[in-house]
Image (cartoon, grey):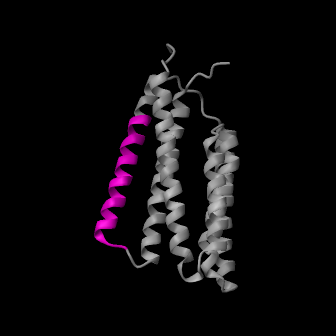
Amino acid sequence: MHHTLTANEIQGRATGAIFFAAFGTLWIALALYARESLRPASLAWLAMILIVLLVMARWVYRQAGRFPTLPGNPAQTRTFNRVNLIQWIAVALTAFTFSRLHIDAYVLSAITAIVGVHLFPLARLFRYRPHYFTGGLLCAWALVSALAFPLDRMQGLTAIGTGILLLASSYLTLDLAAAKLRRTHPLPC
C-alpha cells in the first residue's frame, strides 16, 4: 500500500528537526560550559551547525505547500502534549530528587534517558520509526555515561554525547524528508 505524503507530515518532520537541533545545540553548549570550554569559536561553530539545520528545515517545511493538508487531529495533539508534559515533570522531579540525594553528577544521564524514553510513544504517535532508533541510542548513552565516566567529567561528557545524538537525529530527519520529497510527486488537490 502506497502512503500519500501530506503537508502535515512534512511540516511535522521539519518542526521536530528544529526542536532536536535547538536542544542538541543547547546540550553541547551546556557540555562546553560544564567543561569550562565555552569560547567564542566553539559558539560560532555551534551557531553555524544550527543555522545549517534551520535552513534545511525551512526548505523541507516550505515544500509542504505542494502536498495535501489533512484536518488537524486533536487527539494526536493532546497525546503529544501529554507525553511532553510527563517528560518535563520527570525532568524536574529527577533534578530535584538527585539534588536532594546529593547525586547531582548523574542528573544529566537521567535526563538523557528521560528524553530517550519520551521518543518511544512519539515514534508510535507520529508513525516515525527513526524516533525509536534515536530514543534507544539516547537511553544507551545515558547508561554508558552513568556507568563508564568518572564523576568529575560525567556531566560534560554526557551532555556532549546527548547533543551530538540530537543534532545527528535532526540532520537524519531532514535528510530522510528531503529524499522522500525528491522521490514523491504530489497528487493533484
Q: Is residue 46 above or below residue 108?
A: above
Q: Give the main secondary structure, helix, strand or loop, of the magenta stretch.
A: helix
- 103 vs 186, nearest the viewer: 103
* Percent x, y of residue 85: 65, 58
Task: Determine the residue positioned at 60% across, 29% down.
Answer: 71
Q: Quadrant location of residue 36?
A: bottom left
What is the residue that sits farthest to the front in this orientation? 148
Q: Quadrant location of residue 123?
A: top right
- 87 vs 181, nearest the viewer: 181
Task: Determine the residue positioned at 33% across, 66% down.
Answer: 42
Task: Determine the residue positioned at 65% across, 69% down.
Answer: 110
* Percent x, y of residue 166: 52, 54
175 relative position to 76: left or right: left
- Whether residue 84 is visible here, answered yes or no, is no
Magenta highlight range: 38-61
Q: Quadrant location of residue 74?
A: top right
Residue 169 part of the magenta segment: no
* Percent x, y of residue 184: 50, 21
- 79 vs 147, nearest the viewer: 147
- Whether residue 153 is visible here, answered yes or no, is yes
Task: Determine the residue positioned at 69% across, 59% down.
Answer: 86
Q: In which quadrant will I find the N terminus?
A: top right
Q: Is residue 135 above or below residue 7?
A: below
* Percent x, y of residue 16: 53, 46
